[in-house]
Image (cartoon, rainbow, N blue to C red):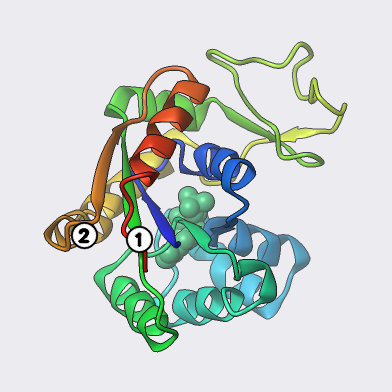
Amino acid sequence: MNIILLGSPGAGKGTQATALEEATGMKHIASGDMFRTAVKEGTPLGKLAQSYLDNGELVPDDVVIGMVLERVTRPDCANGVIFDGFPRTPEQARALQEALQNHDDCISAVLLLHVPKEALIQRVIGRWTCRNCQAVYNTYYLAPQEAGICDECGGDLYQRSDDNLETINHRLEVYTAQTMPLVAHYRQQGILHEIDGQGDVNEVTVRMVQAMTLANPC
Ligand code: AMP
């Protein structure tokens, strides 16, 4: 089974994908995380991607498609993939569908997380992540006990370079213009499941797991 998580920046795709990975044994593949790792390591891919990330723009389709489709050929993806942040354009969706079909595989379900704009902005501009264990905090409603330090492991907390008010507004515009068309595309295929992404994290996970029980087998 392969699942796509759709939703605006800050909708909770990363948090929910991590929970679903634990619950299902499927592999969580996050294109944004792959780019951030490449930027941190200073690889050629990271150097190419950095200005796009900093400005809230999408990395060109051919680069993203090549990176993700190579990643899913590795053995840890054999039990199915939870795609987080990919596809983000119709061209990426087409390339993914074609690659899966070539392996007699398919997209079983697309889970669309709905969160109102004000909440999205608060989630994004208040977000801090642990460099060590990737635990996520929020200065507005889930602050760490000591500012800048992870409660779980004592690691340093950092803010993403694109998690600021100016960039988030642009990222939301990019989402509306380039990614929203995928909602109609997957709805027409009958594999779109819309989920309320507000409230307790565990309750949202329960809604996602329930939606997955309705997924199409490939
Ligand atoms: P995310 O962590 O999913 O919010 O992604 C952070 C940034 O990585 C985005 O603003 C883009 O610059 C880049 N990125 C991640 N996934 C994609 C994608 N599928 N297509 C193009 N750019 C992407």
Q: Which numbered tag is attached to residue 72?
A: none
Instruction: Sort mark 1 into few (<14), some (14-19) or many (20+) by Cα contacts within 10 Å.
Output: some
Which x, y percent locates residue 213?
Answer: 37, 44
Dividing the picture into quadrants, the one containing residue 139 is top right
Secondary element at tag 1: loop
Q: Residue at x 37, y 23 (%)?
A: 198
Secondary element at tag 2: helix
Residue 57 to residue 9: above or below: below
| Viewer-side residue, 135 vs 18 | 18
Q: Is residue 149 left or right of residue 101?
A: right
Q: Amino acid at mark 1?
A: Ser
Q: Residue at x 31, y 46 (%)?
A: 214
Q: Is residue 170 visible?
A: no
Residue assigned mark 2: 186
Residue assigned mark 1: 108
Q: Quadrant of the C terminus?
A: bottom left
Residue 43 to residue 114: above or below: below
Q: Amino acid at mark 2?
A: Tyr
Could you tell which of marks 1 and 2 lies nearer the N-terminus? 1
Hey, which residue is sitting farthest right in the picture? 154
Q: Is residue 178 visible?
A: yes
| Viewer-side residue, 205 vs 93 | 205
Q: Nearer the viewer, mark 1 or mark 2?
A: 1
